[in-house]
Image (cartoon, rainbow, N blue to C red):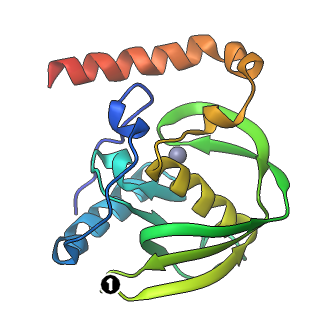
Amino acid sequence: MAVLPVTKLGNPILRKKCNPVMDFSILPQIVEDMFDTMYEAEGIGLAGNQIGLDMALCVIDITHTEEDGVPHVFINGEILERTGEYLMEEGCLSIPDVRFEFNRAERVRFRYQDMEGNTYEDEFDGLLARVIQHEMDHLNGNLIIDHVSKLVRMQHRKQLREIEKTEKSLLAVK
Ligand SMILES: [Zn+2]
């Protein structure tokens, strides 16, 4: 078990489009660490670049809700289609204590691989579709702050600057 530090706003890896996973043999340890890290941080989803890995994978667990019964690992995911729209407030482990309300698609058609490299195509809706879109944003270098207006970002400017400053000082030490 390893709980890893979560990369925060200001870390350049969060702005990178992550590379596809090619070597599936290294996944079991990485995925275990990602679940440990996500549970410790009390998150419901975590993307590879949030633990500093340039790898297109994410873990999701919304089993605390009635909506879904199992945790998920999605490798090399791609959203093929988005339909509907709904408004919800979202937070992000990489931008602590900041929440924004914005629209995302209600339903997605999603193609992904499992840890053995098998390819699937499924439809997801509700909270799971929401979290998939959030994690796919991460793996494409996007963040929740990109979904809100400049005005809304300005309202949180102090908090956002503080997170960036802390992250950059941590990076400078490394
Ligand atoms: Zn996030």
* In-image side of 26 versus 123 (left or right): left
Q: Is mark 1 within 8 Å of ligand 1?
A: no
Snapshot quadrant of residue 119 = bottom left
Q: What residue is shown at x 44% (from left), y 48% (from top)?
A: 41
Binning the other alpha carbons within 10 Å of mark 1 as few (below 14), some (14 to 19) or many (20 upward) gives some
Q: Is residue 25 above or below residue 55?
A: below
Measured from the top left, where is residue 153 in percent x and y? 68, 20
Reply above or below: 106 against 103.
below
Please tell me which residue is depicted at 24% across the width and 72% down the height of the picture: 27
- Judging by the rendered image, the residue that carries numbered circle 1 is 117
- Near-viewer residue (1 or 50): 50
Q: Which of the 4 quarters of the picture holds residue 92?
A: top right
61 on left or right of 64 = left
Mark yes or no: residue 51 visible.
Answer: yes
Name the amino acid type tagged 1. Gly
Q: Residue at x 74, y 72 (%)?
A: 125
Q: Is residue 61 visible?
A: no
Please state, as top left, top right, bottom left or bottom right, where the N terminus lies in the image: bottom left
* Residue 87, image x, y percentages: 84, 49
Location of residue 48 (image quadrant): bottom left
Q: Residue at x 66, y 18 (%)?
A: 156
In the displayed structure, does residue 89 sit left or right of residue 146?
Answer: right
Give percent across and percent down for residue 30.
Answer: 25, 64
Element assignment for label 1: loop
